[in-house]
Amino acid sequence: MGGATNGNGFANGNGNVQSLNRADELLDAVRGLIIPFIRAADEAAPLKASGNSTVTVDGVTKNVLVETHTPEALLKRFALELPDGGRGKDGVVDLVGQVLRYSVNTWDQGFLDKLYATNTPVGVVADLLLSVLNTNLHVYQVSPALTLIEKLTARKFAGLFGFTGPRAGGIVCQGGSASNFTSLVVARNTLFPSTKTRGNAGHDFVLFTSAHGHYSVEKAAVSCGMGNASVRAVAVDEHGCMLPSALREAVLEAKSEGRTPLYVNATAGTTVMGSFDPIEPISAICKEFNLWLHVDGSWGGPAVFSAAQRHKLRGSHLADSITVNPHKMLNVPVTCSFLLTNDVSVFHVANSLPAGYLFHSVEAGAEAWDLADVTLQCGRRGDAVKLALAWTYYGAEGFESQIDHAFEMAGLLADLVQESPVLALVSSNPPPCLQVCFYYAPGGEVAEENEVNTARTREMAGRLIQRGFMVDYAPGEKGSFFRVVVNCQTLRGTVEGLVKAVEEVGKEVVR
């Protein structure tokens, strides 16, 4: 009756039930790998100020941020074997070790690449709680506490944007793109109710978004059967903000073609430059033509917590829906995206369909507690708890302090770039959000050939990784430029060290 278990409380080989030992069978072993992974990033943080955080141990140079390999090389190194007979704890520990070794350590200060960054200790607790509960937020009966958390957190969050109606609140989606997609479905089904049963028949819809808007709007149009050609890019000003006059002209043009203007996507924090579209004048145009106004605040929306920054979201209460991703600026675990509104019942009417095998107690006009009846998903994770726990831990004041610090670091980076004799700032200063964009410009001059700038930027970005800094780049008028994204946990030494690293790597590339 003895023998090692395979993780399910059964003795390997004979299937006889043994005592369960699930609580600590693996957690202690894996903890011994995860804690050093996080601690290594903390220990490397002070080294960033030098411009190179790599260390050499026993003749081997190590980089906490990432061990880089090409996909082909990693395929040869990464030993994933899915066995017929379970390998138990040893197999899991081996695989976890490999995943940690060959993954980017986003806890490292040098991860300045994307619009999300490190997790936090309270975020790890949130993910652990969700994994332990392992429940689905499709119906209230199986997820009572998490359902309340989603509804109450969404209501409180919505209030920050000026949504104060009796049914103000929102829902959680799988990410910003899913939230934007859901907003388009709701817009179409609300403004043109027949589309819920008949589809787009009889309508040639047109959608409008900033020329710097996120590609998810086009993806949503494709998914709704409208095609990406239905999306019209609206011109922006020199700061990357949508021009209301250009929007109005585009709407009139679409109407003159016999098409049906439907939806405007205003962006609060564009992906590259971090620009905020002017919500108030855009709202006036939407009201004039009876268009749905959605604000994609996936990136910049959390600035609403900051008294110093929330003016960039002025007029948010005029929107019909707003996407906000706490997993970006607020550093909660990926994914956590809210779609907020002043009246959640509009979402319910737009998305609800009869499913008697799931939804048993919904009456017309009653508040919906089975959240899958309000959203596009049936399988739903309780991602709202990630924000709820972080909000509980830090408080709104703590979020404000973190966001203000992040904007201070972005301003510092912009200053250092502007003062550097070999860097040319592309962003405005201070930057509108947490991205700082610039070219490497030896001698103070950006190369005239776009191809030269792009080649330099790409090679330098690769070399920066070897020093412990991972940054991104984006296409510009003079070829690709660097786009650095700071976050709420970025330290001053990291910013200063990055500029040193860029200047030094530039000398290696341009001789």
Image (tube, rainbow, N blue to C red):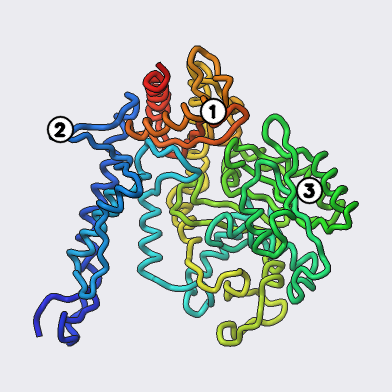
In the picture of the structure, the residue carrying the numbered disc 3 is 283
Total marks shown come to 3
Say left or right for 298 vs 288. Answer: left
- Relative image position of residue 24 (x, y in whole percent): 22, 67
Say left or right for 117 vs 170. Answer: left
Quadrant occupied by the C terminus: top left
Q: CA distance from mark 3 to mark 2?
A: 62 Å
Secondary structure of the residue carrying tag 3 is: helix
In the picture of the structure, the residue carrying the numbered disc 1 is 451
Can residue 480 be seen from the camera position used here?
A: yes
Q: Amino acid at mark 3?
A: Ser
The quadrant holding residue 468 is top left
Asked whether the residues under the numbered discs 3 and 2 touch, taking CB atoms below 8 Å apart as contact, a structural biologist would say: no
Say left or right for 205 vs 74. Answer: right
- Relative image position of residue 510 (x, y in whole percent): 42, 19
Query: Which residue occupies 20% across, 81% down?
Result: 10
**Of label 1 and label 3, which has the lower sequence position?**
3
Query: Which residue occupies 34% across, 25% down?
Result: 51
Q: CA distance from mark 1 to mark 2?
A: 38 Å
